Amino acid sequence: MTGAVTLAEARQRGQRMLDPVSVSAAVDADWLLGAATGQSAAQLRAHPEQPLAEPAWRRYQGLLQRRYRGEPVAYLLGRCGFMDFELVVTPAVLIPRPETEHLVEAALESPAARVLELGTGSGCIAVALGRAWPNARIDATDQSAEALTVANQNAALLGVDNLRLRQGDWYEPVGTARYDLIVSNPPYIGPAEPEPDQGDARFEPRAALRADESGLAALRIIIEGAAAHLEDAGRLWVEHGHTQGPAVREHLAAQGFEAIETRRDLAGRERVTGGR
């Protein structure tokens, strides 16, 4: 670096570098500059003339290079916002999406004393429910030990002590236990669909994104296994692809579910379906 680069200049250079690869280049640059300097966005903007120290400049350049190659900002920062809190995230877990907040909102409409989440990943759903219902017993399963490590860290950091994490495939870790509520955001992208090979999703775990049977395989397993694990009048809520609503509703009905309903995301697309 020849001469000290100011914070304002660093932000501008970062945005120019990321413009060709990110629709949120300015925001990305701000986040990465904050991570490199340890300063908040407000601090960065309050003192644009402040020179950037050489070690921070090197850290910033390294982060920009990784973002330019496509790595998600959430993985570079090691954290991501969800609902009204912040989560630890690593490449072992799916980055929580705003669509999944609709799943949490639907689940919270009817209080439950015993809850099961299938495929917890970062723990975002289970942690959100645990924060809302501190007296509930919440179990969460995942086949990935690495994902459960992240979920456990999030539960600890957010003070959720009513969550039990269990390793295994879907219902297998909970035996014959029954619940008032089962929730899941399973993989639902079909093998031939391009989304996981584009953008940030390229760096996320394949098993959390893709499923066989045109993306319906995991949803089928969850729906077919739910009756054996739900109390009378218990509810199941699942997130699914925006074209999969009819298939999910049909499968729920075939398994004896009633009061089946679908919620739409902010774009008006069918995204969350449940039944009793």
Image (spheres, rainbow, N blue to C red):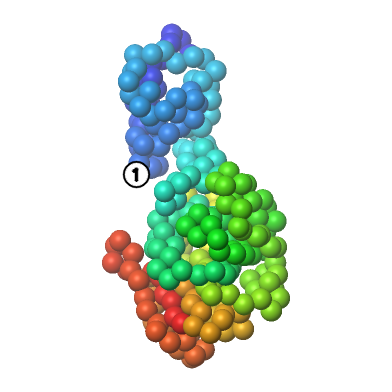
Residue 9, can we see it?
no
- x and y, in percent, of residue 259 in the image: 39, 84
- x and y, in percent, of residue 116 in the image: 58, 69
Query: Badge 1: how crowded within 10 Å, few (<14), some, or many (20+)?
Result: few
The structure residue drawn at horizontal position 47% and vertical position 57%, both measured from the top left corner, is 132
Of residues 178 and 70, the one nearer the viewer is 178
Question: For numbered disc 1, what is the local secondary structure?
Answer: loop
- In the shown orientation, is residue 250 left or right of residue 90? left
The structure residue drawn at horizontal position 40% and vertical position 42%, both measured from the top left corner, is 21
* Amino acid found under the numbered disc labelled 1: Val
- Residue, disc 1: 23
Report how many numbered discs are placed on residues in the image.
1
Considering only vertical position in the picture, is 15 above or below 115?
above
Residue 145, can we see it?
yes
Of residues 161 and 245, the one nearer the viewer is 161
Res 103 quadrant in image: bottom left
- In the shown orientation, is residue 221 left or right of residue 2? right
Q: Farthest residue to the top: give it.
A: 3
Of residues 178 and 43, the one nearer the viewer is 178
Considering only vertical position in the picture, is 192 above or below 31?
below
The structure residue drawn at horizontal position 54% and vertical position 50%, both measured from the top left corner, is 203
- x and y, in percent, of residue 204 in the image: 55, 53
- x and y, in percent, of residue 157 in the image: 58, 43
Q: Farthest residue to the front: give it.
A: 135
Considering only vertical position in the picture, is 12 above or below 264?
above
Q: Farthest residue to the left: give it.
A: 268
The structure residue drawn at horizontal position 47% and vertical position 41%, both measured from the top left corner, is 73
